[in-house]
Amino acid sequence: MSSTTFANGPRRPQVCILGSAEPGSAAFDLAVKAGEFLARNGITVVSGCGSPATRAAAESALAAGGTVVSIIPSDDIHTVDWPCSVLIPCGMGDARNLLMALSGDACLVIGGRAGTISEVCLAWLHHRPLLPLTGCGGWSDQLEANPPDERRNSPILPWGSVEALGVQLTSLGLL
């Protein structure tokens, strides 16, 4: 696995996976493929594993030999049912959404509910690129046309396939 040189020195890129999608949906299937793709390309996956899709993405990244950092809402360091290489029990409940938004060089957005919207807005405020999954329904389908506000704080780079995700990650210098 390679490291990328950023302004603060060499480290592996990190991508947060935000959102929600249910098993059997196209968005869920692409979340699984995205997790594996990120891992195979040496990108650390950051996930809260709070939805079936983000959990499955983390599991597929681990199965592909990748590193997964899980930031969980509880304070229980002994949590054993989270798929991760590194467990961060923040003890902050939903306030951990800020940690999620800040922990990636970019944030994949898959479907989404209210918690996802909160993470997306925080990522936007802190200038993190957003990569919304499109063509599968859900809130992420609307992000490019309806960004959090008018400021254009960060790029919104849609993807609808793993190949398109690779193109967007390359444009950001993460691949």
Image (cartoon, rainbow, N blue to C red):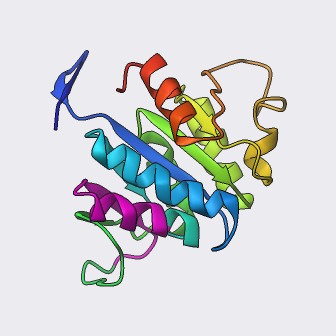
Q: In the drawing, does residue 62 fall left or right of residue 74? A: left
As drawn, 114 above or below 13? below
Q: In the drawing, does residue 34 fall left or right of residue 133? A: left
Front residue of this view, candidates 61 and 82: 61
Q: Which part of the image, by quadrant, shows the N terminus?
A: top left
Residue 138 percent across, percent down from the top left: 79, 54
Residue 34 percent across, percent down from the top left: 47, 49
| Stretch of the chain drawn in magenta | 55-75
- Residue positioned 71% across, 50% down in the render: 117
As drawn, 170 above or below 109? above
As drawn, 160 above or below 129? below
Q: What is the tally of numbered marks visible in this picture?
A: 0
Q: Is residue 77 magenta?
A: no
- Residue positioned 23% across, 35% down in the render: 12
Q: Which part of the image, by quadrant, shows the C terminus?
A: top left
Residue 104 percent across, percent down from the top left: 41, 39
Front residue of this view, candidates 126 and 41: 41
Q: Is residue 33 visible?
A: yes
Q: In the drawing, does residue 145 fall left or right of residue 175? A: right
